[in-house]
Amino acid sequence: MLNKQEFTSSAVPRRLNKTYLTSNSLVLVAALLLGCSGPPPGRGAGEVESAPNAQANFKVETVIGNLEVPWSIVWAPDGRMFFTERPGRVRVYENGRLRPEPVYTVPDVEQTGESGLMSIALHPQFASGRFVYLAYAYKADELRVRVVRYREAPNGLTEPKVIIENIPAAKYHAGCRIRFGPDAKLYITTGDATDRSLAQRLDSLAGKTLRLNDDGSVPQDNPFVGNAAVRPEIWSYGHRNAQGLDWQPGTNLMFQTEHGPSVFDGPAGGDEVNIVEKGKNYGWPVVHHVETRAGMEPPLLEYTPACAPGSAAFYRSSLFPQFRGNFFFGCLKGVRLIRVVLDSRRVVSQENLLDKKYGRIREVAEGPDGYLYFSTSNRDGRGSPASDDDRIIRLVPAK
């Protein structure tokens, strides 16, 4: 049986101290922000790549090019692809073509650093209600995140209704992934807004997983309902900046990917995959990396050096039978996909795919056609874009 320590790439200091805030650290941060030294070599022109451990070969095909930081991808029941671009645009791809104009542009989005228009989710009954949910950063007294529900109409997205707002945010660590769970509740991951202390404060929405009804009301079975000292929206806490979220087929366990410290707030590395459960504390900033403490949940997987996981998706289709039930996530700094083989809560194995081939990878999602899609994030200020970046790319079985 493999455990999280066996997947750690190198040992790191266990405690944050003032040495991480020296001028040398600032130089390291600047170096990290420079990204790759040249454009990624992958063309996305049908070249064949492989997952050797799974004995699977696949073609890599560019679906859409010349985008600007595509962040989140979903599909409507009729097969249309909806996706977000961080500057505030919602785009639609249908019948093999990208609509030339956005279906909607968020008027009050605040794009700064890692923030902007982030996640999109469609209501489980989208076919009848046409509800679309967006999570984005906006400027109030300071940077905040809100989730808004819209109704799709022939002229775009209409009837905006705020589901939740005033979620603390910052230029960095603003979250924010939204997704409906198997229970038809809306789950929202939030960042700590670069204020470490907020993740443990139960009167703050920062550094949490939130759970809401589809209209923004609070489910009565949330873990802290009835406690006046705790925000009732909270499902889990002690998170730094989770941006990937999906449920394991068969068990309905919630898996999240989460960014670890970035030198200014702790020793570098410590990225995580977590199984997130009702009312539990995931430790940040009290524990991180492979530290443990009673009453705080350790990660299932931990990555040092950092890979910067920005997404999460279980593969459910039979088109790639070798991948069925596997957990995938895209890596920004790690410039690869990671495939994890699981047996319920137990990690069986993992392997890197497309390592250093396509640059920074943000989203990963399974399409209704059974292909595995991912988006690049090479125009986010930290990468070196190819001439047609950013792109949405898919993996197609090779004959």
Image (cartoon, grey):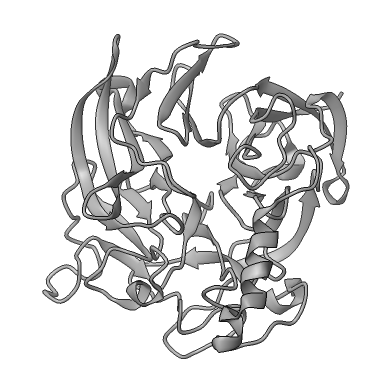
Q: Is residue 127 left or right of residue 250?
A: left
Q: Position of residue 289 (x, y in %)?
A: 60, 78
Of 77 and 83, nearer the camera is 83
The answer to whether residue 69 is visible is: yes
Number of numbered discs present? 0
Q: Is residue 247 above or below residue 273?
A: above
Of 222 and 87, nearer the camera is 87
Of 346 and 32, nearer the camera is 32
Q: Position of residue 15 (x, y in %)?
A: 57, 88
Residue 351, picture quadrant: bottom right
**Rendered-image quadrant of the C terminus:** top right
The answer to whether residue 371 is visible is: no
Q: Is residue 387 left or right of residue 85?
A: right
Q: Residue at x 74, y 31 (%)?
A: 386
Q: Is residue 126 above or below residue 149?
A: above
Q: Position of residue 82 (x, y in %)?
A: 46, 25
**Rendered-image quadrant of the N terminus:** bottom right
Q: Is residue 249 above or below residue 60?
A: below
Of 216 and 36, nearer the camera is 36
Q: Residue at x 53, y 53 (%)?
A: 248
Q: Residue furthest front?
A: 23
Q: Residue at x 71, y 51 (%)?
A: 35
Q: Residue at x 42, y 18 (%)?
A: 102
Q: Position of residue 213 (x, y in %)?
A: 22, 47
